[in-house]
Image (spheres, rainbow, N blue to C red):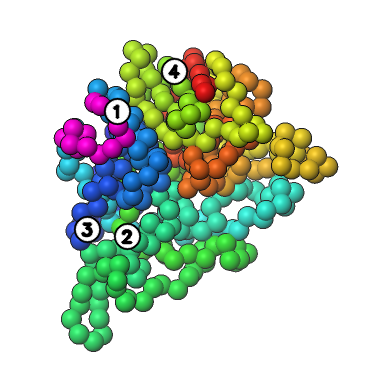
Amino acid sequence: MASNDAEDSTVDTSLDIDDPEERPIMQAQVVLDRQGFGPGVIDGKMGMSTENALRGFQEANSLDITGEMNSETEKKLAQWSDIPATRVVRIPKEWGEIEFASIPDDAAEQAKMDQLGYTSLDEKLAERFHTTTDVLKMLNPGGQPAGATVRSSSGPDKPATNSSSAPKPSPSKSPASSDAAEGSNSLFAVGQMIRVPNIGADRIAPDALIEESWQQTLKSLGVGTEQPSVAKVVVSEKAGTLKGFDAAGKLVALFTVTTGSSNDPLPIGDWKINGVGHNPPFAYNPELFWDVPDDKEKQQLPPGPNGPVGVVWIDLSKEHYGIHGTPEPQTIGRVQSHGCVRLTNWDAARLAEMVSTSTSVVFEA
């Protein structure tokens, strides 16, 4: 799984600012994510998704499966100790041409939009680096990358830390849209230096035969085209995980997922993949949702990362069921779904590059 570290358009090689904190858990999350064992949101904290990722890494490397960062696992992960937990990037100027707009709750109003895109530059940044806006704020105290020198009008300059009193930038709106309202308010701005999780496995192969819009989506999510081929997908309702196995039966990927609810349980059994939809629109049918009144009208919702199924729909042979992304990555594994299997947008996009119509799918209790 190749990484685009030297070619990332958001990276300015002159921005070599040492991180003042070691962040060992975030560094492990970054490595696990690069190896195909998704920790979900990269936040520097041990939690359910990181424990699942560790279990996947341990299984794939024939280690004791504990979900803990024990000495045996630390030793195996040490071969990537040269990969830092974070890096400093500059937000590209072209991001200033993107329209950010708030998204109404009502499906009928959503249907009137051209796309269900990002509501702010902050949200776009968070998805690009597999994290949340709160983590980005933590890594950039006072609006400065942690470790950067904060200029002071009185007294000596000092490095930015989480206790820094440096003023924060005022919220700004994308210059491309005057109608974005409060949904477009952002802490960060085009041209600004920021510290981000050092994600990888994001190289787009020059000869990749994919449509341009999908290539742009992959780039926006920090997901590369060079992913392992998955012959079998196994979703465990009990574990809350999706595992991907290659043709030899080796575990090559694991992601934490949301797998249904008491009203719409996961359909246990063997299924096939009918096809993979990139940036799909969504046919909103209230009759299929137990928590929506049936007298609501059907709607055709536009595509976008903030749509109900995110950026990917992997269609299954079980009618109305699929594997897809989400507009709320922080909720994966923590809230219920309407029966489908839900991943973060970046994990769903990555899985879409691994599977095909020849991939078998097993849903187990």
Number of the front mark, 1 or 3: 1
Q: Categorize mark 4 by other alpha carbons within 10 Å: few (<14), some (14-19), many (20+).
A: many
| First to last magenta residue range | 63-75
In this view, 348 is above or below 23: above
Q: Report which residue position mark 2 lands on.
A: 139
Q: CA distance from mark 2 to mark 1?
A: 31 Å
Q: CA distance from mark 4 to mark 3?
A: 40 Å
Q: Earlier in the sequence, mark 3 or mark 2?
A: 3
Q: CA distance from mark 2 to mark 4?
A: 38 Å
Q: Decide: marks 2, 1 in contact (CB < 8 A)?
A: no
Q: Report which residue position mark 4 lands on.
A: 232
Identify which amino acid the numbered label 2 is placed on: Leu
Q: Report which residue position mark 3 lands on.
A: 21
Q: Categorize mark 2 by other alpha carbons within 10 Å: few (<14), some (14-19), many (20+).
A: many
Q: Earlier in the sequence, mark 2 or mark 1?
A: 1
Tell me where residue 319 appears, x and y as whole percent: 66, 22
Secondary structure mostly seen in magenta is loop
Q: Is residue 92 visible?
A: yes
Picture quadrant of residue 284: top right
Return the mark for residue 65.
Answer: 1
Identify which amino acid the numbered label 3 is placed on: Glu
Q: CA distance from mark 1 to mark 4?
A: 21 Å
Q: Earlier in the sequence, mark 2 or mark 4?
A: 2
